[in-house]
Image: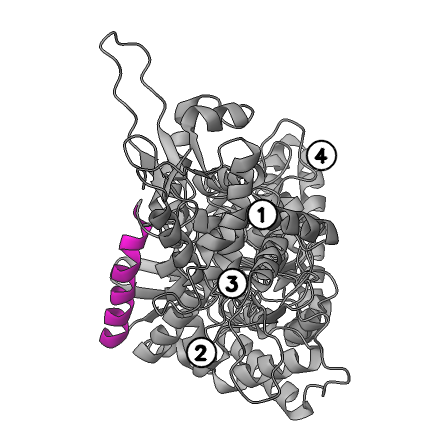
Amino acid sequence: MTSPNGEVSAEQVKAELAGLRAGHPQGPVGSAGSVAGWTRPAPLAATGTLPGFPTGTLPGWLASFVQAVATATQTPPDLAGMLALSALATAAGGRVEVQPRAGWREPLNLFTAVALPPGNRKSAVFAEITRPLHDYERAAVATLAPAIAAAALAKKVAQERADKAQTAASKAPPDQAQRALAEAGALARDADAVQVPLPPRMLADDATPEALVSLLAGYGRIAILSPEGGVFDMMAGRYSRAGVGPPLDAYLKGHAGDPIRVDRKGREPEYAERPALTVGLAVQPDVLRALADQPGFRGRGLLARFLYAVPASTVGHRQVGAPPVPAAVRTNYHTQLQALCASLADLAEPALLEFDPAAERRLLAFEAAVEPRLGPAGDLGHLADWGAKLTGAAARLAGLLHLATHLRAGWARPVAAEQVAAAVQLAGYLTPHALAVFDAMGADPRTDDARWLLAWTTRTSTRQFTRRDAHQAARGRFRKPADLDPPLALLEEHGYLRRVDPEPAGPKGGRPPSPRFLVNPLHFTSQLSEPSQPHARQGSESSESCECAPTILTGHGAAEHLGSPPHVTSEPSELSEPQLPPGCEGSESSEGAPTLLTHRPARQDGQPPPSPYADGNDRHRTLAAAITVAAGGSPEDHADAERLVAEAPDLAALIDPGADDPTIPPWGDLAPLAWALLELDRRQAEGRLLSPDPGPDDPARWTR
């Protein structure tokens, strides 16, 4: 853009500013901020709003109840839908396993977690979803209570007889000792043979890891369903000894179905051959964000076992007096879920569900589609631990949907392709939600560091920098300059930066120059989220962020209460309109471009309004309005803008080549134009403003 002697022609400046007016901003001529050749950068994570829960994947009786609960409680269907899946897993976990193909088995228990801010009626939804499970458990306890009592009494009597025989044998004379000892041994074996059934148990809540092992050893399966996040405190070892890592074995093995064997001094050994643990939680977003700080949670695979949902909060948009759940819908839900529990209760060994050939092919195709996404270049590369379990989760979901579709004998027939297709659809819903959760946790350190760099360039209005500059600005974050290479490479991949090859080292050697980067000027018009410190959000369509935080508009919810990570930001925020000088008004382009400021005097004769360049006064007022917008919109800003235009009238002359020029349209997007003028004003303040050279050789020549 500049000649070898550093000169810039008026034609070049005119082309730059004409491009601004035509909607193709290029920034100041020859500056690092020129947008020539730049395109809008790609977000650092997946864009778009998060999908809503696909209730259509559920069988009719369950889908209708989920929707009715969501309507009655005015909560997102995601909450009731995810809890409904947990309820199915509570009924089937430990009773049924699926075999998608030979040599591969999956139990049907699940770990689910839904994140919603306080005030979203999580407890009410939990009560609706889990009530038939509690009712079934109480009824089963009542049914078996007499038999349990009789067995307990028989064991007590047998034990007392054995104890008396043991006492008699210890006091028997030598000639009778052998006979007495044999009798005492027989009675002891009889006492041990009397088994007292445990009271039926399906549900638990506030159980320590040690108590959980006992529950799994005794029952083989258990479900922890809670509308609070205290379970994560238990996982972290709330009551464990200081200096001992979190006791995660019961949770990890309980999810996978791996055997648990515990031997403790002074206690009987405990053993669970095929433990099946289901966990269904509804927690506050802060709880999920804090999980990444728990030692071992990510490294040992606990977080990868959960299926996450982060729906939009409905608080502030709820219907007052919403209709309750219809009695018939609730009764049908209770009946069907309890029928599923009863149909599986008497299975002595876990039933094995096989996939029919079409279902097996469908799941295999899904597995083949997921695998490339787990590589370093895939969108799940930084979540490979979670993504590697996605196909297995889909197989579990297919088995649960199969049982919910064939309630009373589903365990005796193969899983069909229809249920696998529904499970794959659920997996498609769960994947972007998991990305949102792990992004809020800072799962990809490159992304978090890249956001810090973007925030630094925005905060300091940096248009170009070297790696050494960035390291100097963030010594506490990056130990050495080379640590910046991964986030810088990520920003290059996404179009935020453009690397300029450094000059080669001189013939005398020495330290090579630090790589230099240009910042995409289009990035400065986009909203950024602060790394590592996401802002709490409220509302499902748009919301106010805290002071100094940008407002981000979201759609379905985009996990805004998780801190609005960039991958769920749909559009940049709307700019608040400043107070404009008289004679200027706002308008919006047909394509929804940012607000345009034009001078449009009213006409009463039906003729087109005059050109905004009809006279120098109007032209200067319009330029001043543009600069006012970029500066912030205050009266002081407007006064400074008028001074700038008055003191540099040649700027206006450059922008207006003449109202009769057909090649340059009237005012286009003035936001980048105002930025260009402010940049020129900044150059003037630095003594670098382009000034006219009235030399005889070329009166149109401009020099620095």
**Residue that label 3 marks:** 571
Residue 28 position, x and y percent, is 43, 45
Q: What amino acid is labelled 4 in the image?
A: Lys
Q: Earlier in the sequence, mark 2 or mark 1?
A: 2
Tell which tag, 2 or 1, sits nearer the viewer. Answer: 2
Q: Earlier in the sequence, mark 3 or mark 2?
A: 2
Q: Residue at x 48, y 33 (%)?
A: 688
Q: What amino acid is labelled 2 in the image?
A: Thr
What whole-number distance in Å separates the C-alpha atoms at marks 1 and 3?
A: 48 Å
Q: Residue furthest right?
A: 321
What whole-number distance in Å separates the C-alpha atoms at marks 2 and 1?
A: 34 Å
Q: Secondary structure at mark 1?
A: helix
Q: Residue furthest front?
A: 696
Q: Earlier in the sequence, mark 1 or mark 4?
A: 4
Q: What amino acid is labelled 3 in the image?
A: Glu
Q: Residue furthest top?
A: 508
Determine if residue 246 is in view.
yes
Check residue 171 in the rendering and tell me which mark sits there, or answer none: 4
Tell which tag, 3 or 2, sits nearer the viewer. Answer: 3
Tell which tag, 1 or 3, sits nearer the viewer. Answer: 3
- What kind of colouring is applied to the model shown? one colour
Q: Earlier in the sequence, mark 4 or mark 2?
A: 2
Check residue 213 in the rendering and tell me which mark sits there, or answer none: 1
Magenta stretch, residue numbers: 357-375
Q: Residues within 10 Å of mark 2 (few under 14, many from 20)?
A: some
Q: Residue at x 66, y 38 (%)?
A: 169
Q: Residue at x 36, y 42 (%)?
A: 699
Q: Residues within 10 Å of mark 4 (few under 14, many from 20)?
A: few
**Residue that label 2 marks:** 57
Q: Could you tell whether 140 is left or right of 636 in the image?
A: left
